[in-house]
Amino acid sequence: MITEEASSKIVGFLYQIERAMYRIFSSENDSCVFGVETSDDVVEEITFDNGQWHVFFEQDKHALSTRPQPFQNSSKNLWHTLHIWLSTMSQTRKKYDVITYCLATNKNVGINTLAHLISEANSEIEINSVLVALKKQANIITGSVKQIADKVLNYSDEELKFLIKNIEMLDQHGTHSGRDPKQATINLFHLPSGVIEHSESIYCALFGFMCDQCLTSWRKQQPAELTKEPFSNLLNAEIQKIKRKSFIDQPIFNTEFKKFMEQDNSEHLFIKQLQSIDLSTESCNKALREYWAFYAERVRLQSSGEIPSSAWDEREYALYERWEQVREHIEIKGDDTKSLPVLKKIYTSTVGDYKASLNGHPTEYFYFTTGNYHDLAKSPHKDTFIYWHDDFQYHQEN
């Protein structure tokens, strides 16, 4: 059984991942390195062109709905965080040109709290005033936190004032929009309209990728340090994958083939061709379904504007070339290309178990290729006209 304490720790860790994701996609700088559980919960290091090195140290505290905000005036969270930052400050100030310490939480901290007052202090007067308040609060703390508060007060006023000056509060999730890090990050994806409905799955793919990257590093006992490029690449790949699914063939029963078949009173040349090689009525009916399903999908894809007309021409030529190669191969073997069994073999070898690509992308369903062949077999006016029986080789439409 998972206890409330255990679930709180799990949520706390996942909150760090959410915050790291938000930092990656909200950062306006390409030369950033993001750490998770390195020198802080989340760290963002930025190298500028002028050689300056900035850093954001972030302490993330997620509180369940039943719990108060985590940075109470006498809380261990607040005083332990201050002590951690002070204990590494000497080395940090030597390493970085600009340092920002961030207190991040999902809760509203409140304007009258010590943490909020610290984060708002900028002028010398404000910093001195907050320093007095900090020492006063440290002196009235009791219990186990008292030892931590005393350690904080052991640092010099100059160090304490430097810390106060460079702390910022990121409460209520600390996002520009005020939304939780997950939703705020999704908004920063700037997804195209046709992809927005898949935003959850895209976020989960990126979230899982970050967790995997962190675990891989930790298992090697290495710091989990991340850069923007792999996440940007994965985001783009996820978008393109979904767009391909949206703009490539659907399952046959998702097409509008039934509507077209109900309106169909034509005698199709490709059906006559199939009958000429002695295909069964059932096979001809299947071919009619495949043709109209292909036709419906082509109409849908052409309307989307995502597939250029040149892509259709290229696909038709590729299908025509395949048909020619099959015929030539059978002729080379010496088979009688006028006998019905051989004509059937040419047909089945050409259309069977083959899915032609479209616009450089693979397609999913056989009907989308077979239906395209049927379309070529009914179009004698095209250079890519194909025939299944030699009687149709020089066929002209009436």
Image (tube, rainbow, N blue to C red):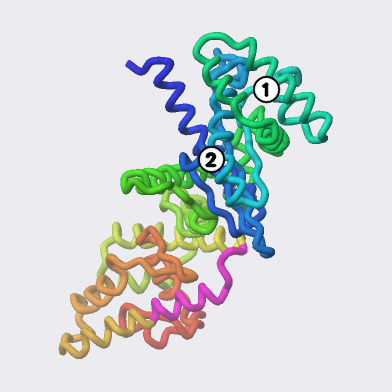
Task: Residue 372 in the image: state x and y as whole percent.
Answer: 43, 69
Classed neighbour count for the residue bearing mark 1: other residues with Cα under 10 Å, few (<14), some (14–19), many (≥20): some
Classed neighbour count for the residue bearing mark 2: other residues with Cα under 10 Å, few (<14), some (14–19), many (≥20): many
Q: Seen in the image, is 156 located left or right of residue 366?
A: right
- Amino acid type, mark 2: Val
Secondary structure beneath label 1: loop
Which of 84/189 is in front?
A: 84
Task: Residue 221 in the image: state x and y as whole percent.
Answer: 34, 46
Q: Residue at x 54, y 35 (%)?
A: 87
Q: Name the residue under label 2.
A: 42
- Amino acid type, mark 1: Asn
Which of 322/176 is in front?
A: 176
Q: Seen in the image, is 45 located left or right of residue 224?
A: right
Q: Seen in the image, is 312 located left or right of residue 303?
A: left
Task: Residue 329 in the image: state x and y as whole percent.
Answer: 23, 85
Numbered badge on residue 108:
1
Q: Nearer the viewer, mark 1 or mark 2?
A: 2
Q: Is the magenta stretch mostly helix, strand or loop?
A: helix
Residue at mark 1 to residue at mark 2: CA–CA distance: 20 Å
Q: Is residue 319 magenta?
A: yes
Which of 77/354 is in front?
A: 77
Q: What stretch is highlighted in magenta?
A: 305-320
Q: Is residue 358 above or below residue 342?
A: above
Q: Quadrant of the N terminus?
A: top left
Which of 24/221 is in front?
A: 221
Q: Which residue is drawn at 66% across and 58% down?
A: 52
Which of the two labelled residues, at mark 1 and mark 2, occupies the earlier sequence position? Answer: 2
Task: Residue 374 in the image: state x and y as whole percent.
Answer: 40, 69
Secondary structure beneath label 2: strand
